[in-house]
Amino acid sequence: MDYHPWLPNLDYENEMIREIGVNSIDDLFKDIPEEIKLKRLLNVGYSKPLSEYEIYLRLLELENKNTKLRMPPFLGGGVCPHYVPEAVKFVISRSEFYTSYTPYQPEISQGLLQALFEYQSLMADLLEMEVVNSSMYEWGSALAEAVLMAYRINGKKKVVIPASINPYHKKVLETWTYGKEIKIKEIPYTNEGKINLEVAEKEIDEETSAVYIQQPNFFGIFETDIEEIVDLAKKKGAITIMGVNPLSLSLIKPPGEYDIDIAVGDGQELGLPLNFGGPYMGIFATKWDGKLVRQMPGRLVGLTTDSEGKRGYTLILQTREQFTRREKATSNITTNEALMAIANAVYISLLGKSGLRKLAEEIYKRSHYALLEFEKKGIGKRKFNSDFFEEFTVSFPISYGKIHENLKARGIYGGLKISDNDAIFCVTEVHTKRMIDEMIEEVKKIVETS
Amino acid sequence: MDYHPWLPNLDYENEMIREIGVNSIDDLFKDIPEEIKLKRLLNVGYSKPLSEYEIYLRLLELENKNTKLRMPPFLGGGVCPHYVPEAVKFVISRSEFYTSYTPYQPEISQGLLQALFEYQSLMADLLEMEVVNSSMYEWGSALAEAVLMAYRINGKKKVVIPASINPYHKKVLETWTYGKEIKIKEIPYTNEGKINLEVAEKEIDEETSAVYIQQPNFFGIFETDIEEIVDLAKKKGAITIMGVNPLSLSLIKPPGEYDIDIAVGDGQELGLPLNFGGPYMGIFATKWDGKLVRQMPGRLVGLTTDSEGKRGYTLILQTREQFTRREKATSNITTNEALMAIANAVYISLLGKSGLRKLAEEIYKRSHYALLEFEKKGIGKRKFNSDFFEEFTVSFPISYGKIHENLKARGIYGGLKISDNDAIFCVTEVHTKRMIDEMIEEVKKIVETS
Amino acid sequence: WDEPLIYELSSNKKRKQGIIIPEENIDVKIDIPEKIKRKNDLEIPELSELEVVRHFIRLSQQNFGVDLGMMPLGSCTMKYNPKVEELTSRVVENYHPLQDEDTVQGILEMMYEMQKWLAEMTGMDECSLQIPAGAAGELAGVLMIKKYHKTKNRERDEMLVADTAHGTNPASAAMSGYKVIYIKSNQEGLVDIDILKEVVNSKTAGLMLTNPNTLGLFEENILEISKIIHSVDGVLYYDGANLNGILGIARPGDMGFDIVHINLHKTFAVPHGGGGPGAGAICAKGELKEYLPYPIVDKEGGKYVLRTPVKTIGKIASFYGNIGNVIRAYVYILGLGPQGVSQVGKMSTLATNYLISKLKDVKGLELLAPHRPRKHEVVFSAKPLLNDKGVTALDIAKALLDRGFYAPTIYFPGIIEEALMIEPTETEPKETLDKFIETLKEILEESYKDPEKIRQTPQNTSVKRLDQVKANHPTSVTPSYRVLRLREKGVIKILK
Amino acid sequence: WDEPLIYELSSNKKRKQGIIIPEENIDVKIDIPEKIKRKNDLEIPELSELEVVRHFIRLSQQNFGVDLGMMPLGSCTMKYNPKVEELTSRVVENYHPLQDEDTVQGILEMMYEMQKWLAEMTGMDECSLQIPAGAAGELAGVLMIKKYHKTKNRERDEMLVADTAHGTNPASAAMSGYKVIYIKSNQEGLVDIDILKEVVNSKTAGLMLTNPNTLGLFEENILEISKIIHSVDGVLYYDGANLNGILGIARPGDMGFDIVHINLHKTFAVPHGGGGPGAGAICAKGELKEYLPYPIVDKEGGKYVLRTPVKTIGKIASFYGNIGNVIRAYVYILGLGPQGVSQVGKMSTLATNYLISKLKDVKGLELLAPHRPRKHEVVFSAKPLLNDKGVTALDIAKALLDRGFYAPTIYFPGIIEEALMIEPTETEPKETLDKFIETLKEILEESYKDPEKIRQTPQNTSVKRLDQVKANHPTSVTPSYRVLRLREKGVIKILK
């Protein structure tokens, strides 16, 4: 191999060896015991370096092995199909952003720092929380970090969560808190699909480190007793954590209006593609309280001035972080989702105040329309009689599994099955009325022919 | 309409009207006669401004109305399917390049100017011609401009072209020279598909303004008597113009080695997509001769120094251009294909000396392989017994039209039909051996079942 | 940065390549006749992908585009180019122009709609999308006029052009073999009707006019002009470069124009990419539409087909024009919708007159016919400043570069001395217009206070003012690295 | 530029929107219960598309990335990110992670191949791609160790960590409830075997090690270390952050490691995007592979399916990890091929030692154990310079910024005073390495000649050195525009 586009020095090897003053490249590896040296090529990739065109053909082959759908899937579960504006993709494709790294040298990283500061600021205003870090991995890990943070603050090991929590987040929470032996208690939901306040009153006690509320919850339903839960938690000295879909916050009360301690969520719904699981964008925010801020995980960008008094941005409160504090750090996180935070900032800026509201309203309307159509056509009814956003649960007269497979065969991907006859559907701005009608029409045919 | 993403001042209208000091926006149009004012909305687009997502859906719809092929078409005719490296797309998508314009202000346009200078330089070295302009529209118009330039220089109206010229270029030549009443004479080709030297000797006379040679010619065949033609032209005082496929020049003699006066061609084969006809990239070059250079059309970038002696780039010899010389200009061209020139520069730089040669050799091999396979399978034979590059002409035992339609039905797009049983096939690096074999296999089936 | 030339990045002594060429195992010998083999080695550098990409990204940072700031280049219509246009490539990118019609119905449908919409916007009967750029549109238009008269056996060898016209107008006329007759403007900057009447005769092939003209003024006598030209069977040609100022307000067809070219890249926000590629259309009305370049997309029995007008002048481009850009304009129209497209002329005119209201009384500038509203653009003269302080329009332009703006077009049109031709477009927000106004005022104030300082601008750009004499002199002119190399070797000498 | 905050671009008094929201004609009333409606207005600016795009493009120009120049950040492996990786989005972009396996066979096939290849490269038996970044991989690994010992009913509460380790190692151990025990390095910068033997006991859960270590030194006693740890049933954990130095040369599995995490974004050139997103994998050998986070992609009867290891620790991410980036690493491996991947350790080591050979005798710098070859990186100490002239590693870093380079990692690892940790990677051409060497030498010379000048750097960046006290002080700390606004209104005070 005497050249490769990504290995510029192959043909310089002898020259550099000479300059180094050794006899052969092996001399640079003489400290590696012979018995562990690999004496063969690694068996990876295909048999040779592929050209770009061959890579393109391979990717096309993979793409064609995925099922082509006629319309975006009606799937939610914490991440939903949305339209990603070209301007968002364009900005985050800028070399200066996407080939950079953590802005350890602020003087040469002002663009990134300001963009992250703007993300923090825009998200702070959406949440009405003062301090937002510049990203966690995703909602699940943000929630886990919030629970670990509460434990660091009050040393208690019991965390109370609703049974209507997103189950995928719950699994992450369980794993991440396994090391600290955190105990997780669930509050069941009512027939209306909301937190059972009576049980909550019993479950939230002096032992409780933190109480988690998800709004809207896994079923898409708006919780309406958040004030009450927050009151209960405060009385018992527990930290309140609220998980939010940021897209809904132009319509409903943000965590700040409930005086929540920590807010978490995912920025996926603000301009990120589904990406089969990631990268997404974990939101993590606290209110203006030093006790909280100093225990916060993740990176923070702050405003300051330079030696000439000019405004500038830099990483702040770094003594919380692992690279300075090691085992005393507030988290082990270092590589995060900064570029996704910028995508969020661009997205929020593009929509602006009015656009965010318009989009939320449109999604609200379309998802309600879809449920109403299911009901009108007599092929499904709502499982919970509560207001909802983006996602809703439908009970079908026949097995949903059957509906699902038949829809799939027709190039349509339905909702998420949660029990034999029930499924959660997600409807957003990417589902046109025509698509919704077509999907429901197909479901009708399936139900009627079975 | 009180807002639109691309019309930022809609909601400022009243405020700006007030500042201007008129009563209404109509006052700004009072100089337009009432009878020609349009009193209704223009009936364009669809019924409302489409959102990005709706535009996306519409484009998807259009894409799906095009036929999806299983492999790139085997079509040439002056432009060929090639792989466009991602790095090329990436560079020309840079805001600073693609949203800029003609570098009238060199101080703030050094990046563009240097990139264009590098295009000119790289192309000059490929052609071995000293002066390359920074783009014409495409091969056809570059040829037409060359002929018009020859006419400006010697005032003669007869231009001699080979019958094996690309017929699409010929049509452009005819249109563009119509105003100057240029007479076009064709030299027929031999049984070997090359210029008939005997006829050329007769046709090139004292009246001849310019002689055009295309290498390789429309049939993909290498002309081997170029020296002889150039000699004939020189004897009669005619300007020599040579059209080239730049990709072939790492293998064969470039215009400079024949002492050609003007070289033309298309940069499409150096990193530009097919784009259903454009944008492409007209190459236009002359040798180091003031008589030629001063009559050259198009824009030239040159090297100079700034007031502090630092190297810099600027537009040069602008007195040739329409914006200073109006009707005395060497051409009317202003908007050109500058960004495509940069794409060419990036492409040539990526491949480099060795890569250009490797690619040309690979294309040579594959196209020869394809013809040999046609012959081996006994389903087609070469029409001309000459060496060729990238394209070749096959004679089939049955009507090519029939083969073509049947191939199309199988998702394969064959060659370009030039007579009942003959077609020109184009094979490049995007046609893998597997694809070539598959195409030939399908042709075989068609031929054998008819 | 001081970015070296790409040739200087590589010693070319080591084997490098920025991309892998796919190779098949094929047993074919390269057997090119000795007579035609390349003799000289290719003088092309070898580099890794990183080196190539980094080089051009660094170069890009030394360039200015609309995405970075306002480009008030008069007559260039440097609009913002919406990013949604980037979605278009999948519809056209990989389709060969010689593919049969039945395999590209999606593309043809788009072209068909565009033809219709462009005809509607200009008040013409039919459009052809053959045109890669504006000047090519003019050439097509003038050739149509030529063939039209020839077909009618009329001897016409004079083309009339306003003295405010874009340089392309006379150049296109000349390329088509016409004698160019300039019509002087009157004191108001409009076509002088009396002169026009005098000049028009039986040799007149037509008049090429842009309306609003390059001063941004609407030719209010357009109906009379039309009558005069048509009275001698002349053809009235509309240069669409300035269409932006009246789009949705008035249509060339309704003014009496017979042929119109459109710069899609200007009016419909296709990125111009450092000088191009653009995209265009040529449209005509009545009889003249049969002279349009072919092909035209037609619809027959639900299918899109290509048609050749019966008296066509032929082809302007080898294939169908810059379709890759036409579809960007298509997307722009979809995004604006009928409501938005109809606002373009209004909002661009509003922006121009807003600028005028803030700049017209600034010391150092003067404005012809200040009482007249402008449309898409305005031309100030900096002659008072030159007289007072010796600071030129060029100096003002350079001072703007230092302050984050591109410069206006300068020294055009020729009838205005020390011209500063400003076209804000409707896509620049009022906030930016205000900033531009403020900056220009500062520069003028500064010019009165410290003219030398302005003459020393730009200071913040990657190079200072360039030596144009050296750049153009026969002994030093260097249009390629090859020339530099060969001159150093003594192989080439003065450009004679 | 001085680019204002996005909030300051808009007065928010006029209606603007940067993108149109699609609207359907649907008759549904928004009927949210009063109790939960948002009370306060959103404080989000309204802007046109141009304003948003221009703002962020201008910001981007004030940032530095690998595409602009060398980023020798030690332990960050800032390779060039080949542009072909941008082709991957179509394979994954629009697929929902909850889709059935049969609808995403292409993605699963890619994941399956990656799992296999990563196992091969590390010498492990199985890999899980659940890991969004390196630190999450460590957490997963440590939790696996925890569950492993628990399953075996062993009481283990001590995690051993080398004192040269990345800060993430102890942080991850602590997050998992372990007590962290640091192992001091010996004079050569390697794990001190004697100390290790002393420390290891029946409470030892395992040892977390990176090899080559953060000094770039290969732990040559690794087989003995492995024996010591395994002798008490401890688990040997490999921190993959430094894998680049030995890729293709030696495999952690062959050294005795039981668990390995991989930073795909480092070793396989996935762009890190200003701090992330990254992508990772966690791999294990023998018994421990049953503790891996789920799901693992398996192949059954020609179909790809998801499998859960029997003793899994659970899930690290809600879905499958950063698949959008995993596929970029996949493309990198395809492009390098077995030949290229096998060259990575060699070429990165070559580059490092080339730098060392040119810098080791430069006045002002010193190097621990200079006779030992380094692998992917090297840590110089600028202590001599500090002692001689009072110029710090930080000053050198800032001086590099002025000269077109990003700075090395500084003040890490802690055992080296005034550390300059340089990692060139194998993607930087020798030409750039030479330039970097020359530049660093110049800075050191300058530091001796005019130390004050170096302390005043950077001068050419968009801001000068920043006030870190103000940035962090409870009275002035400003982590959002909201804080600035509320502080000005007196609503919020000191951060207590």
Image (cartoon, coloured by chain):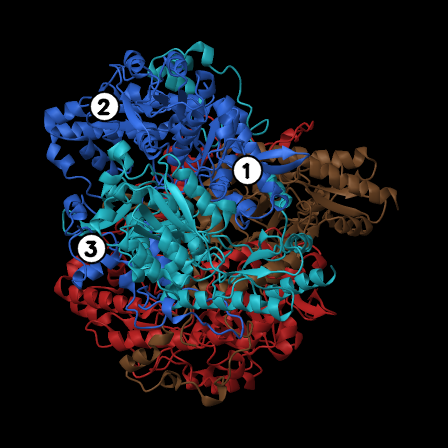
Chain colours: A brown, B cyan, C blue, D red
Task: Check contact, mark 3 vs mark 2: CB within 8 A.
Answer: no
The amino acid beneath tag 1 is: Glu
The amino acid beneath tag 3 is: Gln
Q: Residue at x 27, y 36 (%)?
A: B329
Most extreme residue toward the right, as rendered? A450
x, y percentage for residue D138? 52, 67
Q: Residues within 10 Å of mark 2 (few under 14, many from 20)?
A: some
Task: Check contact, mark 3 vs mark 1: CB within 8 A.
Answer: no
Q: Nearer the viewer, residue A82 or A381?
A: A82
Q: Residues within 10 Å of mark 3 (few under 14, many from 20)?
A: some
C258 versus B185 height, above or below = above
x, y percentage for residue A406? 80, 50
Protein chain holding label 3: D
x, y percentage for residue A372? 75, 33
Q: Nearer the viewer, residue C376 or D103?
A: C376
Protein chain holding label 1: B
Q: Residue at x 56, y 81 (%)?
A: D202
Q: Is residue C45 visible?
A: yes
Disc number lying in front (3 or 2): 2
Protein chain holding label 2: C
Circle number at residue A91:
none
Residue at the disc numbered 2: C415
Residue at the disc numbered 1: B52
Q: Nearer the viewer, residue C221 or C90?
A: C221
Q: Nearer the viewer, residue C353 or B327?
A: B327
Give the spatial CA distance, label 3 vs label 2.
53 Å
Question: Toward which corner of the image does residue B75 lie, by quadrant?
Answer: bottom right
Do discs 3 and 2 belong to a common subunit?
Answer: no
Give the spatial CA distance, label 3 vs label 1.
49 Å
Residue at the disc numbered 3: D456
A67 versus C351 height, above or below = below
